[in-house]
């Protein structure tokens, strides 16, 4: 029992074990990537307004290293049922709580007689 395995058999076993370990690691990585993609699709499907989409797009472009973390957090909130849909105010608040300073674009709207008009038309009449 205390005898050692021949060198060729030991090399074969180690090679087989190494291949299995690499295969498992590759499968785990693929599974994690698939889960990440599914979470991202879930989050984007639950965005209810343009402001929320704008904020996530800005987060993705300005902070690409923090974007996957934000998606995981938003996905977890949706799965737990803490929020049912994500509007701009909710996304902005969550980003602020996470310490990601993303600001929405400033839009000034001029409404005249129930229609949105440009500044010249607003001041003209």
Image (cartoon, rainbow, N blue to C red):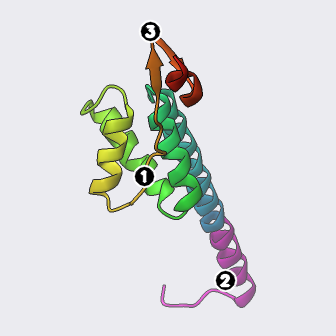
Tell me, yes or no, if residue 73 can be seen here.
yes
Residue nearest the viewer, comparing 87 with 79: 87
Q: Going from the N terminus, do you reach mark 1 or mark 3 first?
A: 1
Given contact means CB atoms under 8 Å apart, are the residues at marks 3 and 2 in contact? no
Question: Magenta span covers which residues?
Answer: 1-19
Left or right: where 68 falls relative to 74: right
What secondary structure is found at the residue carrying circle 3?
loop
In percent of width and height, residue 121 lies at: 57, 22
The residue where tag 1 is placed is: 103
User: Residue 14 at what x, y percent from top left?
Assistant: 65, 78
Q: CA distance from mark 1 to mark 3?
A: 30 Å
Task: Please tell me how crowded label 1 is: few (under 14), some (14-19), or many (20+) other residues with Cα within 10 Å.
Answer: few
Nearer the camera: disc 1 or disc 3: 3
Q: Residue at x 27, y 34 (%)?
A: 80
Q: Which mark is residue 113?
A: 3
Decide which of 2, 40 is in the foreground and name it.
40
Task: Verify whether residue 4 appears in magenta.
Answer: yes
Badge 1 or badge 2: first in the primary sequence: 2
Foreground of the two, 104 or 43 = 104
Magenta segment's dominant SS is: helix
Is residue 32 shown to the viewer in this render? Answer: no
Which residue position holds label 2? 10
Q: Is residue 2 left or right of residue 75?
A: right
- State which tag comes first along the sequence, 3 or 2: 2
Considering every residue shown, the one lying at the far right of the view is 8
């Amino acid at each position: 029992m205390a005898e050692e395995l021949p060198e060729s058999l030991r090399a074969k076993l180690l090679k087989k074990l190494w291949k299995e370990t690499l295969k498992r690691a590759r499968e785990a990585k693929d599974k994690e990537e698939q889960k990440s993609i599914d979470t991202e699709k879930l989050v984007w499907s639950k965005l209810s307004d343009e402001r929320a989409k704008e904020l996530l797009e800005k987060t993705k472009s300005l902070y690409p290293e923090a974007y996957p973390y934000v998606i995981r957090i938003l996905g977890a909130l949706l799965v737990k049922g803490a929020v049912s849909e994500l509007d701009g105010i909710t996304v902005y608040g969550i980003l602020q709580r996470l310490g990601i300073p993303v600001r929405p674009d400033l839009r000034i709207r001029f409404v005249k007689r129930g229609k949105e008009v440009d500044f010249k038309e607003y001041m003209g009449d």
